[in-house]
Image (tube, rainbow, N blue to C red):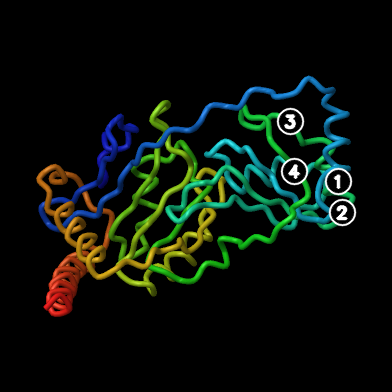
Amino acid sequence: MLSATQFAYPTLTQTRLNSTDEGPRIPIRYVESVSPKASPDQTRLDRGERRRQHISDGPVPKTTLYVGNLFFDVTAEDLRKQFEKYGAVENAIIVHDARGLSKGFGYVTFSTVQEATEAITQQHGGIMEGREVVVQFSNTTYRSMADQKPSRTLYIGNVPYELTDQDLQDLFDDIPGVTDVRIPVDRRTGLPRGFGHIDFKDQPSASHAKEVLSRKAPYGRKLAVSFAKRKVLSPEDHLRHQQKKLERKNSPRTSGVNEVRGVREVNELGQAEQKEAESVQEKTDEQKQ
């Protein structure tokens, strides 16, 4: 079983879960981040007049809206709930960077232009999670996270803040092949930011987990699960990455806590990574010669 003390939202940069004496560690890490403060109001114009002027000066009307200046823990589900009062929301997404972190903006698509226009009239300059948001017709195209190519890493969003160690145990109980779980936390509050990343030993394991996790709704919140972007590493960077993972896995600081599941799979992964790292090193040495 997982130790509850490991989920007390640490002040350190990261905390990971370890295994019992029967197997290796499957790390679950809390990674600190700092959310920026809300921007001050930059104008004294009447809010209603500002919104009307904003619509007339903005891009050509369409069904998709750009929503900017969002607090970085706002999820796609939060965005949907905020805008569905103005019409039928067909899609709502938050745009993330290569690490899976929110870029502070997203897109909402309505069924009609009239609904989208009403949403701008009511929401532009309004307050969401303590920040004054920018809402306008989208003047560019976007790519949904659901369109990401399959990889060994999953992005998991809409994670309940009250998730406990037992909840995580249950969440991954029927999912094999997990090698690393990262849960970002806000450095100022110590609370999770509502999303994380999960690494698997291979892409088929990640695909299976995506199907399983997409059907789960802890505390009534349906998880948003998609493949995360993976950077293409040079042989040297790949070698350093593999060596760091091995060092992290064998670190004395990670002993004495429990695994989630997949003990044998992680053992095999560690051996495979070692061989892969050695193979990459040999190729690198040959190229240098």
Residue at left offset 45%, top offset 56%: 98
| Type of the residue with mark 2 | Val
Residue 172: which quarter of the image?
A: bottom left
| Type of the residue with mark 1 | Thr
Report the disc number at residue 126.
3
Residue 168 at what x, y percent from top left?
A: 37, 48
The C terminus: image quadrant: bottom left
Report the disc number at residue 24.
none
| Type of the residue with mark 4 | Phe
Element carrying mark 1: helix
Q: In the depicted view, which residue is nearer to us: 123 or 41? A: 41
| Type of the residue with mark 3 | Gly
Q: How many numbered circles are shown?
A: 4
Between disc 1 and disc 4, the foreground one is 1
- First in residue order: circle 1 vs circle 4: 4
How far is the residue under mark 3 from the one under mark 2? Answer: 20 Å
Element carrying mark 2: helix
How far is the residue under mark 4 from the one under mark 3? Answer: 12 Å
Residue at left offset 9%, top offset 45%: 252
From the viewer's perspective, is residue 273 above or below residue 109? Answer: below
- First in residue order: circle 3 vs circle 1: 1
Element carrying mark 3: loop
Read off the residue under disc 2: 113
Tags 4 and 3 touching, CB below 8 Å? no
Q: In the depicted view, which residue is nearer to us: 244 or 15? A: 244
- First in residue order: circle 4 vs circle 2: 4
Read off the residue under disc 4: 83
Q: Residues within 10 Å of mark 4 (few under 14, many from 20)?
A: many
- First in residue order: circle 3 vs circle 2: 2
